[in-house]
Image (tube, grey):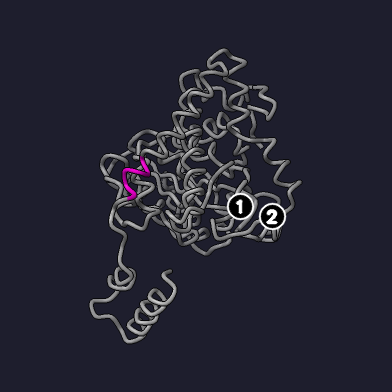
Amino acid sequence: MVQMLAPDGTYTADPAYCCYAMNDAQLRTAYRHMVQARAADEWAFSLNRQGRLGTYPPATGQEANSVGAVMALREDDWIVPTYRELGGLLTRGVPLKQFFLYWLGNEHGSAFERELYHVTPIVLPIGSQLPHAVGLAFAERYQGSDRIAIGFVGDGGTSEGDFHEALNFAGLWQAGTIFFVQNNQYAISVHRDQQAAGATIAQKAAAYGFEGVQVDGNDVTAVYAVTAAAAARARAGGGPTLIEGVTYRIGPHTTSDDPKRYRSDEEVAEWQSRDPIVRLQKLLRARGLMDDAELAAVITAARERARREFDAVEPFERPSVEDTFRYVYAEMPPLMLRQLAERRRRLERTGT
């Protein structure tokens, strides 16, 4: 597994990725994005408990993956996200208020301006976005462009058929696609060891004829380096890469989940000791890039921004119950009409 920044803050360059070390400015930028993602994530969780936000999937502990990966790409490369890439979206420049708008149930929150961000809509079905990433990369090459695409997925998504189909075609077509698996150890409540017999997810790439790399997903410097190397290879026509970012979901799968039913406090504490933000703080201090006051100021500003940007979108009108039924068929079939009627009755009876 590729690791450069150890949990104690010790940095050891990897000769295989010496061309892709983050410079001082990039380290500071990565810290700001990761802290902003953490602050927004924690605020979203709190908002759910206050009854001001619906079901939300926290990503605390996983920030280094999408931040490091997106920083390693060009601004016009495609990002095909799932639902735990808040850090990567912020790194690309997507407004935080738009992210909040999405989780408030407003469809415009996931309509990212294509030519400005090159980000596809957030995808909730597991694994279905990966074929899109392959198609985008293939289309770019067909049109003579050297843009590439990165598709994110969780470890649970690697057990889906779409994962196999996407990697098979990417390998066959040598599409400029990076498959980034955020291996946070659990597919909701199912541990990675109960999903597949292979020792790693990265090794699955061999079956599709391209390279797989396992990286410490709590080390933003290593994530950046392996993704930058994969991007250079893809842009040069060398085909896809499967990257497995080994990380951990500190919180629940969603705000509707109770992780205490399937994992121990000791396990969580062990992973908290490998926190990606804390270890980056240690590196920034050791190199004299930020002192304690500056590190704390970034956190304070991030928390204030999270509250400010949510407040800006909270007054938006919520979708009606009819909106959740009305856009699938031109004429609603009898089954959906019955479901809509039942939903209305429940809403009148319980208010939820």
Residue 141: x and y, percent? Answer: 33, 44
Closer to the camera in the image, 208 or 153: 153
**Counting residues from the N terminus, which is met first, the one under dot 2 or under dot 1?**
2
Q: Amino acid at mark 2?
A: Gly
Name the magenta segment's main secondary structure: helix
Would you name the residue on which mark 1 appears?
A: 204
Instruction: Specify the segment rendered in magenta.
Output: 309-314
Q: Are marks 2 and 1 in contact (CB under 8 Å)?
A: yes
Would you name the residue on which mark 2 appears?
A: 198
Q: Is residue 115 visible?
A: yes
Label 1 crowd bin: few (<14), some (14–19), many (20+), radius 10 Å:
some
Considering every residue shown, the one lying at the far bottom of the view is: 334
Above or below residue 252? Residue 18 is: above
Residue 235: x and y, percent? Answer: 40, 36
Residue 56: x and y, percent? Answer: 48, 54
Instruction: Point out the image quarter for the C terminus.
Output: bottom left
Closer to the camera in the image, 299 or 137: 299
In this rendering, position of residue 148 left or right of residue 1: left
The image quadrant of residue 247 is top right
Residue visible at 67% across and 35% down in the picture: 274
In this rendering, position of residue 4 left or right of residue 208: right
Label 2 crowd bin: few (<14), some (14–19), many (20+), radius 10 Å:
few
Whether residue 312 appears in magenta in the rendering, the answer is yes
Whether residue 18 appears in magenta in the rendering, the answer is no
Closer to the camera in the image, 222 or 91: 91
Q: Amino acid at mark 1?
A: Lys
The local secondary structure at tag 2 comes to: loop
Residue 80: x and y, percent? Answer: 41, 49
